[in-house]
């Protein structure tokens, strides 16, 4: 099946883009593996005709928004996201009406109707730079991740309005969960995704215990383990990333902060489904033109910060 996928990609002028949380066999067949930011850059820059997006729906939708002339397909239509689904568009519209001077900054984990209502899209790799660039006298609504929002507010020392959403996978990565692993592995470096449920406690409390966690996007984590001389890392994010870490920075120990931090939406994509998706060019992800145009503006504003 692996060889069939490779052959079909060539015949059909197609690429497979895979998120860092994808199953190992799906990562192995991908032309590009990355975090949300790098996947959207890859989607924008690919010369391929067909993009098979091995990730979740909002990511494939972002690829479709950036590639109106290309065909974007997703191997499983059920690949949702608890965080992206937490947003009520009507409430965002009301906030905009009440705050004509306000700025809406949306994490990339949102659907296209929310992106279209936003001034900026951001990822965990560029959210600090983007919010910092907004004049302090303008109210900011950050959505949908409350932990990432709290992290931004704490790092920048700025009051922002924060949507009350969370990722059910990262919510499991609480301060006690991470601390249990820290106590067991005192020599390990601690890598924390800012979506984690430890939120600002990690940022403020851990240093008091002599632990200096590094807050990184998934791509930031992979790059960090490659260049760090350390031999052991506690990884506080979805466990799928450990496969890529072990492949690109072998000979080190990667300890999941929680073994059950597994995103069932990401794991819906199997090698068989990637093959079927490529062969039958299903399921096509299409976005209404007016929404796509408005969402593209907010995404392009983000690219100015990368
Ligand atoms: P990044 O890969 O952008 O760090 O995001 C993590 C995530 O949860 C994606 O859904
Ligand atoms: Fe969404 Fe969380 Fe899964 Fe990422 S890990 S796709 S934020 S549910």
Image (spheres, helix red, strand yellow):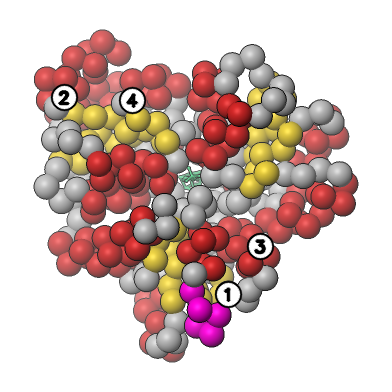
CB atoms of marks 1 and 4 within 8 Å: no
Residue 259 versus residue 95: which sits nearer the camera?
Answer: 95
Front of the two marks 2 and 3: 3
Q: Which mark is residue 203?
A: none
In the rendered structure, find residue 155 and report the number of the disc placed on it. 3
**Badge count:** 4
Q: In the rendered structure, does residue 135 fall within the stretch colored magenta?
A: yes
Report whether residue 186 is seen.
Answer: yes
- Identify the element where label 4 is drawn: loop
Residue 37 x %, y %: 41, 47
Secondary structure found at label 2: helix
Secondary structure beneath label 3: helix
The answer for how far apart the CA atoms under marks 1 and 2 are is: 46 Å
Between discs 4 and 3, the one toward the N terminus: 4
Which quarter of the figure is the N terminus placed in?
A: top left
Q: How far apart are marks 4 and 3 (CA)?
A: 35 Å
Tell me which label, 2 or 3, sits earlier in the chain: 3
Query: In this orientation, which residue lies closer to the viewer: 31 or 173?
Result: 31
Quadrant position of residue 187: top right
x, y percent for residue 236: 65, 39
Q: Is residue 12 magenta?
A: no
x 30%, y 51%: residue: 62
Image coords of residue 260 (percent x, y): 62, 34
Mark 4 burial class by Cα count in 10 Å: few <14, some 14-19, many 20+: some
Precedes in sequence: disc 1 or disc 2: 1
Q: Nearer the viewer's eye, disc 2 or disc 4?
A: 4
Lateral position of residue 30 relative to residue 179, left or right:
left
Q: Name the main secondary structure of what is drawn in magenta.
A: loop
Q: Name the residue under label 1.
A: 160
Q: Distance between the residues labelled 1 and 4?
A: 38 Å
* Disc 4: which residue: 30
Query: Which segment is the magenta one?
Result: 134-138
């Amino acid at each position: 099946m692996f060889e069939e996928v490779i052959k079909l990609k060539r015949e059909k002028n197609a690429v497979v883009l895979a998120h860092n949380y994808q199953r190992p066999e799906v990562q192995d067949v991908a032309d590009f593996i990355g975090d949300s930011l790098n996947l959207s850059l890859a989607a924008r820059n690919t010369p391929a005709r067909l993009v098979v997006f091995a990730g979740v729906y909002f990511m494939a939708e972002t690829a479709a928004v950036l590639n109106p002339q290309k065909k974007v397909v997703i191997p499983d239509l059920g690949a949702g996201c608890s965080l992206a689904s937490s947003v009520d568009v009507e409430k965002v519209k009301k906030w905009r009406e009440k705050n004509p001077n306000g700025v809406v900054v949306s994490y990339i984990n949102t659907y296209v109707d929310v992106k279209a209502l936003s001034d900026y899209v951001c990822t965990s790799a560029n959210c600090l730079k983007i919010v910092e660039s907004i004049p302090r006298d303008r109210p900011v609504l950050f959505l949908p991740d409350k932990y990432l929002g709290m992290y931004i507010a704490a790092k920048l020392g700025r009051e922002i309005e924060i949507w009350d959403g969370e990722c059910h996978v990262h919510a499991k990565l609480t301060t006690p969960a991470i601390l249990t692993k820290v106590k067991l592995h005192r020599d390990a470096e601690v890598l924390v995704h800012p979506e984690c449920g430890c939120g600002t406690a990690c940022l403020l409390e851990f240093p008091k215990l002599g632990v200096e966690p590094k807050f990184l996007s998934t791509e930031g984590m992979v790059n960090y383990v490659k260049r760090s001389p350390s031999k052991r890392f506690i990884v506080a994010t979805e466990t799928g990333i450990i496969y890529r870490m072990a492949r690109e920075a072998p000979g080190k120990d990667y300890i999941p902060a929680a073994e059950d931090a597994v995103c069932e939406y990401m794991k819906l994509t199997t090698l068989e489904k990637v093959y079927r998706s490529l062969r039958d060019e299903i399921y096509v992800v299409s976005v209404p033109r007016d929404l796509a145009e408005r969402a593209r503006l907010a995404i392009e504003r983000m690219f100015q910060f990368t």
